[in-house]
Amino acid sequence: MNYVEKLTNLNLPADATVTLTYSDGCDVFVHNDTAIDDAIKETNTIRTFSDLVAHLAESSETTHWILEELRDNYVLDFEDEEDDNGDPIPTRLSSYEVSDGIRDLFGDQDFVRAEIKRYDYKRGFCDMVATLNISVEELLKSQPDLTGWEVEVETADGTLTFEV
């Protein structure tokens, strides 16, 4: 059973929040302050997150929240165009723009974080963890490829977590 069937079978309200988490890590040196830069280069977390966000922005009519979140976190620096009624026209979002923004301003954004575990004074492991909250309705409408992502949602019986 895929994630779409699982979420549909739960009969959740359309505005229920789904938390998507992706993690990838690598061995790093911790003694020379390059651990995070090395993990950014060696893992695909930022790229996977950027691809998901670009897909959501392209396939959903209500993606202004994604653009706002990216702007609020300094990942993207542009303004929406407006139509004749003054309503925002969604900007086409490139996964490359999102990736570059996160890499360039890693410390100023909240989507991808680094978790470093030290083995000793010189070596360690850095997990790069991406997190995105989205409504059930938007997720089911866009149906992105969530291979490798963890899905978490609150149900009447507690928190349900599963990997796709």
Image: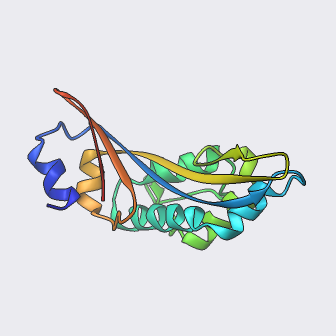
Which of the two residues, 15 or 6, is positioned nearer the viewer here? 6
Which quadrant would the N terminus be assigned to in this image? bottom left
Could one spot residue 89 in this view of the protein? yes
- Image x and y of residue 47, in percent: 56, 68
Which quadrant would the C terminus be assigned to in this image? bottom left
Quadrant in the picture for residue 98? bottom right
Q: Residue at x 84, y 52 (%)?
A: 122
- Image x and y of residue 71, in percent: 62, 50
- Image x and y of residue 128, in percent: 60, 54
Could one spot residue 87 in this view of the protein? no
Quadrant in the picture for residue 16? top left
Q: Residue at x 61, y 73 (%)?
A: 96
Q: Residue at x 59, y 62 (%)?
A: 46
Quadrant in the picture for residue 11? top left
Indicate left or right for 123 with 139 as reference: right
Q: Residue furthest front?
A: 120
Indicate left or right for 13 with 96 as reference: left
User: Tag count in the figure?
Assistant: 0
Q: Residue furthest right?
A: 32
Q: How is the image coloured?
A: rainbow
Q: Compared with residue 107, is residue 53 higher up or lower down, i.e. above or below? A: below
Which of the two residues, 87 or 42, is positioned nearer the viewer here? 42
Q: Residue at x 78, y 56 (%)?
A: 35
- Image x and y of residue 146, in percent: 35, 63
Which of the two residues, 97 or 64, is positioned nearer the viewer here? 97
